[in-house]
Image: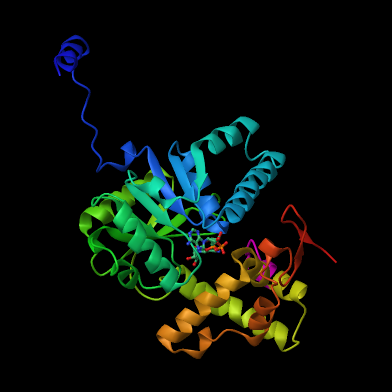
Amino acid sequence: MAEQEDFETIVGKAPEVDENDPQNLISAGVVGAGTMGQGIAQLMASSGIDVILVEKDEESLSHSMNELAEMMDREIARWGMTASEKRAVLTRIQGTTDMIKLQDIHLIIESVTEDIALKQDLFRRVDQICDSDAILVSNTSTLSLSEIASVTSHPDRVIGMHFMNPVSKTKIVEVIRGLHTSEETFTYIKGFAERINKVAIEVYEYPGYVTTRVIIPMLNEAMYVLMEGVSTAEHIDTAMKLGFNLNFGPLEFADMMGLDEVMRWMETLFHELGDLKYRPCPLLRKMVRAGHLGKKTGEGFFKYNRDGKKIID
Ligand code: NAD
């Protein structure tokens, strides 16, 4: 104690760090290292935040860490990133299968498979492990935040951040208030979005929010058009891309998102809103059952090489 006082007399008192300012955030957790979790971890690491990235088992973790490194190699090949930036990002990301490593972390972003029981189970565990003032975020596209938050002891500190794919390239994130989300939590997350260079779109809890709800009928309709033999996958995508000035056609876009995820979103929207426009196209179901999940498995509506590039027949 005396030593501490001597030290403070000489160098002055260390300034208090305001934990409620997202600019002071030095480390964060991401649970689920799939397509989105990898992107979110990379984004935070490149914004100077140390990341603890949690996967369900060692095999999935090592697969995800390899994918993340390969994704950055592709960026380097496109001159979108340097080798030293890649090293800096990777040194900031600590992969683990041990949730207990999240115990002192103030901000945790969950990005596991779109399944309410799985997400609730994780929120229950994270809630027990972390401090009572930790902020728990879900990247869910369609599930109810209030339902997810209901298993925690602090639903006021649960909020949604719906990132878009690919995370590093899209400019927006939807920030979603659950029924009990507090104003403090909302303000913190808006500041955090700014820190990681995203424009925050404020939305209230509702199935599919803005982006998923609006894009899904277009993807589904393109699948019906293909199934009904109106045109080929290539022509459908070219028509929509060139006709409406889009970066990707709807079928390639669905492949990028992951067909299993897209099907889950449709099922939730169909179940919640009861509207036939969200009923998953039978062709989509067939492809998911066959394990053709899009880019992540190398085959969906199109085929992809190891670099994730579409193979033109
Ligand atoms: P994904 O299938 O690529 O990844 C999910 C990951 O979660 C897998 O790596 C899986 O091993 C891991 N996981 C499962 N159970 C776990 C557990 N108990 N502990 C730790 N990790 C576990 O899915 P994704 O596309 O990354 O989607 C994840 C979330 O992001 C979903 O809620 C989805 O709706 C949302 N989302 C996806 C997109 C998209 O375009 N794919 C866009 C916005 C939001």
Asked if one can make out residue 161 in the rendered structure from this viewpoint, the answer is: yes
Q: Quadrant of the N terminus?
A: top left
From this view, report whether residue 116 is shown above or below residue 246: below
Could you say where residue 71 lies in the image, as x and y percent from the top left?
A: 65, 47
Q: Of residues 181 and 220, which is closer to you in this image?
A: 181
Does residue 101 appear to the left or right of 255 in the view shown? left
Q: Nearer the viewer, residue 35 or 183?
A: 35
Image position of 192 (left or right of 218): left
Image point 45% across, 45% down: which residue?
A: 52
Please, which colouring scheme is shown?
rainbow
Question: Which quarter of the rendered picture does the C terminus lie within?
Answer: bottom right
Residue appearing at x 37%, y 37% in the figure: 26
The magenta-colored residue range is 240-248
In the depicted structure, whether residue 155 falls above or below residue 187: below
- Does the magenta run of residues contain 245? yes
Name the image quarter holding residue 8. top left
* Residue 149 sits inside the magenta stretch: no
| Left or right position of 263 against 16 | right
Q: Which residue appears at 70% of the width and 64% of the height?
A: 297
59, above or below 121, in the image: above
| Residue 162: x %, y % from top left | 43, 61
- State the image quarter where residue 148 is shown: bottom left
